[in-house]
Image (spheres, helix red, strand yellow):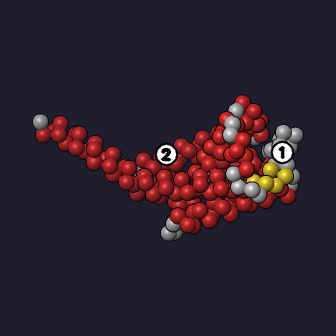
Amino acid sequence: MNNILSFVYASAPEWLYDVLLFVLCVMAVWIFSRRKIIRVKLRRLLGVVYIEYLVLMMCATIIFRDYSTCSLGVELVPFWNYKYYTNEVLWETILNIVMFIPVGFCSAVFIKRPALLKIFLLSMVLSGTIELSQYLLQCGMCETNDLMNNSVGGVLGYLLYRSTPILLNAFRQKRFEYYGQGAIA
């Protein structure tokens, strides 16, 4: 696991991780904002941040990749590395899923009628573009596992987007019941 973390942190400049943190903060504010005026302004900010995040992904996976530590080639067999179950394989899988959660969430914000299939296909196309670029530019391993894990991350981001109103309404209802009982007594 230490090798994976050192590879991830050595691959990209520090400011890229600051951008990632900023994307996650804007997503959190979007989730918890209730007023429509704030949501409209946040949507514009989220658009800019989403573009920056996509650039961050391209930088981390292709542009600023350390070529000396990368394994090169193509692996089209699904789940090929799962039989060598180690912490590094698990960590790489988790990182690939987490990397695409903002893609699913932000895409759902900007697509007119977001649907699970649209987000899944968009995640697959974006991940396929990254994998194909890694193969063509010889800067990484082109794997079907990454394609599948990234698509799962995009779907999880979409599900997070769809579940936030439900969770917030449940939270507000519980808060109202709690404060409502205190006011009556």
Residue mark closest to the camera, 1 vs 2: 1
Q: Is residue 47 above or below residue 113?
A: above
Kind of residue sitting beneath label 2: Ala
Residue found at the very far top of the displayed protein: 2
Q: Which mark is residue 148?
A: none
Quick one: 69 or 102, which is closer to the camera? 69
* Mark 1 or 2, nearer chain start: 2
Kind of residue sitting beneath label 1: Ser
Residue drawn at x 49%, y 45% is 28
Task: Specify whether 171 is left or right of 112.
Answer: left
Alpha-carbon span between mark 1 and mark 2: 35 Å
Q: Is residue 90 above or below residue 33?
A: above
Q: Which residue is mark 2?
A: 28
Task: Specify whether 88 is left or right of 113.
Answer: right
Element marked by disc 2: helix
Q: Which mark is residue 71?
A: 1
Is residue 139 among the parts visible in the rendering?
A: no
Quick one: 107 or 128, which is closer to the camera? 128
Tag 1 and tag 2, C-beta contact below 8 Å:
no
Q: Is residue 145 above or below residue 16?
A: below
